Amino acid sequence: MRENLHRFFRAARGVGVHVSPAESIDAMRAVSQVGFSDRTILRDALLLTLAKSQDEKLALGDCFDLFFSRPEPRQDQPEGADQDGSQDADQAPSSGVASDAEGGSPQQELGPLAQMLLSQDRNAIAAAIAGAAGAASLSDIRYSTQRGIFSSRILDAMGLQRLRDELDKLTASNPALAERLRAALDALREAVRDTVSQGLALYAREEAENLRNEILRNAPLARIERRQVAEMRALIRQIARRLRERYSKPRKRQRRGHLDVRRTLRRNAAWGGVPFLTAWKRKHRDRPKIVALCDVSGSVAQVSDFFLLLIHSLHEVVDDVRSFAFSSHLIEVSEILEKNSPEEAMAEIMSKVGFGSSDYGSSLVDFEKDFMSTLTPQTTVIVLGDARSNNLDPRADILRRISERSKRLVWLNPEGRLAWGFGDSEMPRYATFCSVVRQCATAQQLERAVSDIVATYQ
Amino acid sequence: MAEQKASTSIEAVESGLAAQGYIASRQIATAVYLSRQIEKPILVEGPAGVGKTELAKAIAAWRGMKMIRLQCYEGLDEAKALYEWKYAKQLLYTQILKDKLGEVLGGAQTLHAALDQLHDFGDVFFSKEFVEPRPLLQALEQPGGCVLLIDEIDKSDAEFESLLLEILSDFQVTIPELGTVSAITPPTVILTSNSERDLGDALKRRCLHLHIGFPEQRLEERIVESRVPGISQTLRRQMVGFIHEIRSLDLKKLPSVSETIDWARVLVLLQATELDTDTVKDTLNVLLKYEADIEAAAPQVTTFIAKAARSNVFG
């Protein structure tokens, strides 16, 4: 049964429940306390030890039901039947069936599998399938394309070859029996197929999901296919949630610094310098202030969606964020982003300023004219854009003034470094005034960039 | 059979808690049983007022142990949770013992010799007598074991969680000047959280995770029965049914078990025999704590009462 538990842990990882070795040890200890006899108690115990949140509990509960939905081994068989079966696939079930066969079955010369099929002993068949599945290491299944190979491996382990030979012989000698056997074999194939599908559902989810997310995280945002957009959004939302969890609660760090010796001495002069009361220096910490400028013009249309989504999440993390969107001119979008859901906000912003041809120069002029006063020496300015200004005046001088007024100026560019400075890209001219310029083409880079910015204020 | 024993002991936990007026579901009883068997703390999550804190009290009363409670809040630190040096006492003693120190050091010829002699006495002021034990340390020092309730852990800072890790996994704390203090009898630790923030993985890993949600109708009826004995069966059914209907609404704060009990008490006080629209409307403020919620629920009251009464006929 221990083997089964280990497989259950793997299945649990598959549904996204984090099961570390330490947790599996705890689960083992808990299970050894409650035993296997009462399934609801077993379920509760596993849920208690393995799941760490309500979502995980639900997922794990489903996984448990799926995992243990197989027909149970016969009651009078010892509990270890499954385990024995996995070590030598044929022996355990055959020993159970052999006794049946002695009870008057005429087909003594048939192999164990044939006898089992003819005896119609469902429990024995189920146990044999489970055993063979163990022998074929079904838990290694990863992709749906592997279903065929695992099915045939399991059938081979159950002794299909011998059954085929016997079928050939029987067709000549005893056609009726052969017919019965053939029908039973078809049923067996079906059962095995179901087992494999179940195995796929249990064990493959983790791998497939990880793989997909990994690819998605590192895929260039600008070249996401239509059908992936929804998944990408989900991923960005995940990133945003992570950022929020990490940074949203203004963690009260100890603001107390070193002992202020002078003030302590002065305060305790009355007691002859015996320090009854202590005075401490205080650490100074900046409140985060962020100003985000997001390019939503046609050239970055694909990426700006995700940029806006991330800015939206910034609004939830940091109190003091002002955000602006621009293509040929610039507007403030803080309010839109704060009031609406990400989807609505993005649609509204896009309808107001989106998809135009970008003009960084005039957008910067707009910013300087109306919003320059929002910048303070504590502000971090983030510009999200490709710096392609359609050969119009880039007005880098305004960017210099922005940089001088603010604490930091971070430019996140969705294009690769190689493309900077070619064509109408003004990146090199702007870069001189930026504290940091980062390429920001994938979801992962986006997460790191924003995380770094927020972290400087912690 | 060990397994037979398990299910009977879980039932024993259930009935033991029931004797203290805490009606536990099977999951809760299993968690309490397991935490005792494999010596692990229980992290209880769930909405406010479903009896997370009550659980700890019930366990303490059932096992006849002392309950030590640590209420968490922002800015809670080592000095308030674990131990503190009695600074004033230390200072006072140095002043009083000034002369004594003179005698001790009197025999020393050189500064070095004096320092050596002083070293022998140096640790006197950092000994057990000068430690003020706070809840966590107190819990470890209980000879007969105790129930340690760390309430609303989600209100504390993330740093405080790390402080708890040692005590949760090994039932010990390390005081730099004194060394490691291990528990005499491992306490039963209950942590509660309202999920205001996500707790760290390290903390979660060390605990059994128990989620207490709103109870099922039957269970809630039993809870009301045990807490408010004076209430008639019909009224009890009706009011619990009504509350379950209320919980299906989209409200800011759903009424939880503590509100159910309060309401039951109120209804008994008003000597109501069954629910009627006026009584409910007058007492809705016991159940719902926001003006907006009351406004949202008020128009539905009549329908809900009818529904609750109907389910009563069949249930």
Image (spheres, helix red, strand yellow):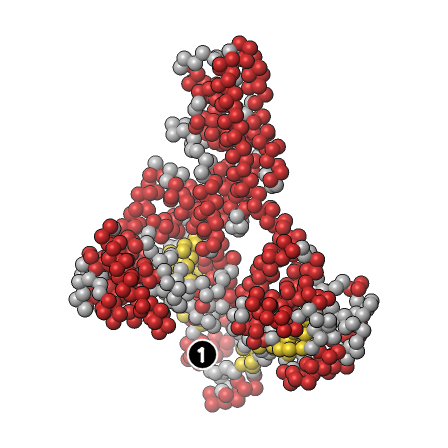
Name the subunit of mark 1: B
Left/right of residue A160 with respect to residue B4 in the rendered view? right
Name the residue nearer the viewer: A399 or B309. Answer: B309
Can you tell which quarter of the image residue B115 is in? bottom right
Residue occupying the far right of the picture: A422
At label 1, the amino acid type is Leu
Residue ID at (17%, 62%): B273
Q: Is residue A240 visible?
A: yes
Residue ID at (44%, 81%): B95
Left/right of residue B217 with respect to residue A130 in the rendered view? left
Residue ID at (58%, 58%): A234
Percent x, y of residue A70:
46, 35
Percent x, y of residue B6:
35, 42
Give above or below for A23 relative to A321: above
Left/right of residue B31 with respect to residue B239 in the rendered view? right
Residue position for label 1: B91
Look at the image and tell me in which quarter the N terminus of chain B lies. top left
Residue ID at (60%, 46%): A207
Q: Residues within 10 Å of mark 1 (few under 14, many from 20)?
A: some
Percent x, y of residue B137:
41, 64
Percent x, y of residue A288:
59, 76
Name the residue nearer the viewer: B189 or B305. Answer: B305
